[in-house]
Amino acid sequence: MDSNHTQIQAELDALIGRTALVSDVVSSHRIAALAATLDTDAPADGSVPPLWHWVLFQDWQKWSTLGPDGHAARGEFMPAIAGMERRMWAGSTVTFHRSLRVGEAVERRSSIAGATLKQGRTGTLAFIQLRHDIGPTGETAITELQDVVYRAADDPAVSAAVPEPVPPAARTRSVMPDALTLFRYSAVTGNSHRIHYDYEYVTGTEHYPGLVVQGALQATWLADFARACRNEAPISRFAFRARRAVFQGKALTLAAIDGPDGLDLTLRDSGGAVCMAGTAR
């Protein structure tokens, strides 16, 4: 382990325990806007479906404070890590103690639970684990453990795809990640990261082949599909892990099959490669 690695790890260790608190109200307008984006209807009873809470707690920063990629400047809560300019949401484990409801005043209590450097296939990676406790003051309705990965800006953007056949017994659904859906999802969640809506930027600067489908949108498609497979039975826990980037313009296949820990879920690209895997129970 070189001295630079040791220094960065020490800086990451110092982040553990850092906290942030934000408040919001579960807005019927935001829930309706997300439902429209997903081409569905919001629940008539005012409950918030699993993962739809991601329309809450939006962090709208002044234009002058945004980085060239559209992200807010890092350093206040999420760290800025020298030499690791790219950041991705690698996965989450979300426990639903109860559903949020439209009109509720809620808060999100966030903390940095872990921070580790690892050597990956493409270079050094920094893994930051966040814990979010969400609900009205004094109550936790949702607990989310979120994994965020930092990497160097010049890492290869896309690895080679390896097709994996859909199991014969799986239930499937097709979704189309078109540019309009990506733009609307970014808008309704307050996500200004340019890779999701700025084609010239994402292809010319970050060298992806097209607009990148939000990991949160992929997970939401999977969670909604899981509810449909379970006849709308409540989901108490949903976990997902992103495996590879997904791009606009070609249909994606959602697949679900009963597993030992609930419903096993996958999202495949048009070539059959698994881009996200998850479980719902």
Image (cartoon, rainbow, N blue to C red):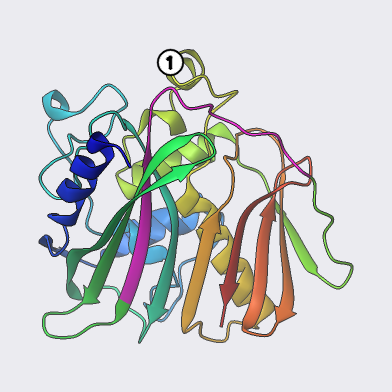
Q: Nearer the viewer, residue 113 or 176?
A: 113
Q: Residue 97 appears in which quarter of the rendering?
A: bottom left
Q: Position of residue 141 (x, y in %)?
A: 29, 82
Q: Which quadrant does the N terminus fall into?
A: top left
Look at the picture and state if 208 lies above or below 233. above
Name the residue nearer the viewer: 80 or 7.
7
From the top left corner, tell me how far across and down residue 25 is, in percent.
Answer: 19, 66
Is residue 103 visible in the rendered structure shown here? no
Question: How far from the left and from the top, in percent, is residue 159?
Answer: 63, 34
> Is 155 colored magenta in this rendering?
yes
Report the amino acid beneath label 1.
Answer: Thr
Residue depicted at x 19% and y 65%: 110
At horizontal 18% and vertical 41% (from top left) the residue drawn is 7
Identify the magenta region: 143-162
**Quarter holding residue 98:** bottom left
Q: Which residue is mark 1?
A: 205
Q: Relative to residue 106, is residue 74 depicted above or below?
A: above
Residue shown at 73% from the left, 80% from the top = 258
Please give left or right for residue 59 compared with residue 242 in the image.
left
Q: State the image coordinates of residue 184 (x, y, percent, origin top left).
A: 44, 41
